[in-house]
Image: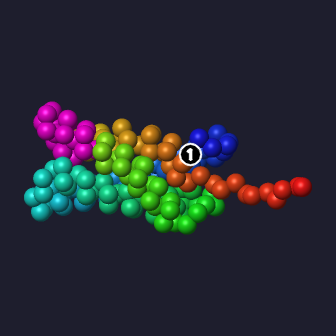
Amino acid sequence: MTGDSWRTTGLRWLKFNFVGGIGIGVQLVVLTALKSGLHFDYLVATGLAVEAAVIHNFLWHERFTWADRAAEASLVRFLRFNLTTGAFSILGNLAMMKLLVGMGKLNYVVANVITIAACSVVNFVVSDSFVFVAKTPHLPDES
């Protein structure tokens, strides 16, 4: 993690979970609409639902959770976010859904909530230490 104080990191963790909680709602609504409403395969529906939540979460993390950290352009951060936490979330969700639903016969919504919780801690660490890292100011040489 970064050099933030425990208090700052704790507050950021709360913000991260607040945004993630709304993202869970986004993911579950999209998953249910695609699976039950449009009759998509549960794995295809899961992948698309996770990506919808990833986009939602990035936008709020950029403007709320890590708004205090100056960094490169939003597009660069979005690509980093999608290629790290987004990829981990999609791959983790697909693997765990295959295990829990495909093999374990668990309800797809219950299984999805379990997979979201399992991926959240890793996503916070990666976001805090890689995606939303503050740029260090460049100091001029004293030659």
Name the residue nearer the viewer: 17 or 78: 78
Q: Amino acid at mark 1?
A: Ser
Question: Who's the residue at 12% across and 63% down the image?
Answer: 38
Q: Is residue 87 visible?
A: yes
What is the tally of numbered marks visible in this picture?
A: 1
Left or right: 9 in relation to 38? right
Left or right: 51 in relation to 31? right
Residue 50, position as x, y percentages in the image:
30, 54
Above-or-below relation of 142 to 104:
below
Residue 135, position as x, y percentages in the image:
65, 56
Image quadrant in which the C terminus is located: bottom right
Q: Residue furthest front?
A: 143
Mark 1 surroundings: few (<14), some (14-19) or many (≥20) residues within 10 A: some
Question: Who's the residue at 66% across and 45% down the image?
Answer: 4
Q: Is residue 99 magenta?
A: yes
Q: Is residue 42 magenta?
A: no
Question: Who's the residue at 50% across and 60% down the image?
Answer: 77
Q: The magenta stretch spans which residues?
A: 93-109
Residue 127, position as x, y percentages in the image:
50, 49
Residue 97 location, quadrant:
top left
Residue 14, position as x, y percentages in the image:
52, 47
Q: Residue furthest top?
A: 104
Query: Magenta stretch mostly in which secondary structure?
Result: helix
Helix, strand or loop at mark 1: helix
Name the residue nearer the viewer: 6 or 48: 48
Q: Is residue 15 visible?
A: no
Q: Residue furthest left?
A: 39
Image quadrant in which the N terminus is located: top right
Q: How is the image coloured?
A: rainbow
In the rendered image, which residue does mark 1 sit on? 129
